[in-house]
Image (cartoon, rainbow, N blue to C red):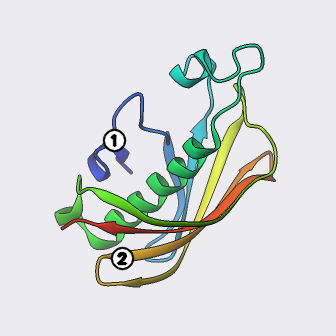
Amino acid sequence: MRIMEAIPHRYPFLLIDRMVDITLGQSAVGIKNVTVNEPHFQGHFPARPVMPGVLIIEAMAQTAACLVVLTLGPAFEGKLVYFMTIDGAKFRRPVGPGDQLRIHVEKERSRANVWKFKGIARVDGVSVAEATFSAMIMG
């Protein structure tokens, strides 16, 4: 899938590299290869670089937004998607350079232009972060 056609995010804020395991209207997995040259590592614990948890949540949202656009079709490509809620966020272990995040998102429900998702980010099959969130796609 062409992520940059689906969502308007660009470097340095585009936080997913690839989408896999897509089931339209239901679930998807976003892949983020975490590299040391990302700008947040310069100041976020330079001696022990850690990807900020809020960026992991943002990567979940970007994965979900791609799924929404794929589900709704080309008319929604590049539309803005705004967070409405973030609930139950948990961060289980630090994520750093060299890790590959596999960001699993699953739709819990949707009504009109509001979608609610459960997201779990994993590294090597181990959960590193999770949250439930809802977002509104602006048509």
Name the side, left or right, on which 102 lies relative to 82: right
What amino acid is at disc 2? Val
Name the side, left or right, on which 101 lies relative to 86: right
Out of 107 and 28, give the one closest to the viewer. 107
Q: Is residue 12 above or below residue 94?
A: above
Mark 2 near mark 1, Cβ–Cβ under 8 Å? Answer: no
- Residue 71, image x and y in percent? 35, 71
Secondary structure state at the residue bearing disc 2:
strand
Q: Is residue 76 above or below residue 108?
A: above
Of discs 2 and 1, which sits in the foreground?
A: 2
Counting residues from the start of the chain, the first of labels 2 and 1 encountered is: 1
Quadrant assignment for the C terminus = bottom left
Q: Write down the residue under mark 1.
A: 9
Q: Write down the residue under mark 2.
A: 114
- Residue 29, image x and y in percent? 57, 57
Q: 10 Å neighbourhood of mark 2: few (<14), some, or many (≥20)?
A: some
Name the residue: 72% across, 29% down.
96
Name the side, left or right, on which 99 lies relative to 109: right
Q: Quadrant of residue 114?
A: bottom left
- Residue 8, image x and y in percent? 28, 45
Real-space CA distance between mark 2 and mark 1, rounded to the nearest whole angstrom: 19 Å
Q: Is residue 11 above or below residue 67?
A: above
Q: 10 Å neighbourhood of mark 1: few (<14), some, or many (≥20)?
A: some
Name the residue: 37% across, 46% down.
3
Name the residue: 69% across, 15% down.
46
- Residue 7, image x and y in percent? 31, 50
Name the residue: 35% across, 59% down.
82
Secondary structure state at the residue bearing disc 1:
loop
Q: Which mark is residue 28?
A: none
Out of 72 and 97, give the one closest to the viewer. 97
What amino acid is at disc 1? His
